[in-house]
Image (spheres, rainbow, N blue to C red):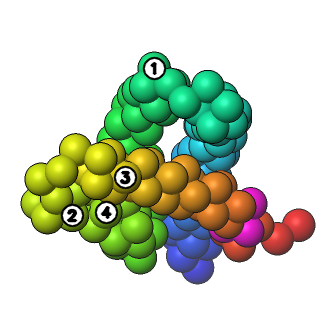
Amino acid sequence: MQNTKTVMNIMENHKDADVQKQISMLKQLHKVLTYMIRSLILIIGYLIIDSIIITSILAVIAISSVPYMITTLIKLKKWDWIIGCILLVGIPLILGFTVSYESSLRSLFFLISLFMFYFFCWILRSNISGWIKDISPRS
């Protein structure tokens, strides 16, 4: 009987460790998304200044954060969010490279894709707190 209780305690401790690891990953992702969303101030600058430099900065921030975001979503097994990201961001980007040969239309698809990426990040960030509450141990 004592062995059964020991095995149960070990299993419970392992489960708690997994939960804590997931919470840690979610908090880190939340922090990264918060900084990314704050970079949206640059979009306001883009509307006022109309600068390719600001668009380039937004694109570099987006491109550099995608691997971390997707890797974290894979580790958390949030497949629907990965598919959503591909649909929201990938489709306008692919259309820009395949359908349009005109540079202004290609730029429009690029800007739509960039906007959709930041919109996706905002929605994802809004949902992370709920995920943490769902997996947190009840006190």
What residue would you read off at disc 2? 95
Q: Amino acid at mark 3?
A: Leu
How would you rate the neighbour count of disc 1 (Cα within 10 Å): few for under 14, some for 14-19, many for 20 or more?
Answer: few
Q: Amino acid at mark 2?
A: Leu
Give the number of the mark in front: 3 or 4: 3
User: How far apart are labels 3 and 1 at the CA level?
Assistant: 16 Å
User: How far apart are labels 1 and 4 at the CA level?
Assistant: 21 Å
What residue would you read off at disc 3? 108
Q: Tell me the magenta residue range.
A: 128-132
Q: Quadrant of residue 10?
A: bottom right
Mark 1 or mark 4: whose residue is earlier in sequence? 1
What residue would you read off at disc 1? 53
Residue 38 visible from this viewpoint? yes
Mark 3 or mark 1: whose residue is earlier in sequence? 1
Closer to us: 26 or 109: 109
Q: Amino acid at mark 4?
A: Pro
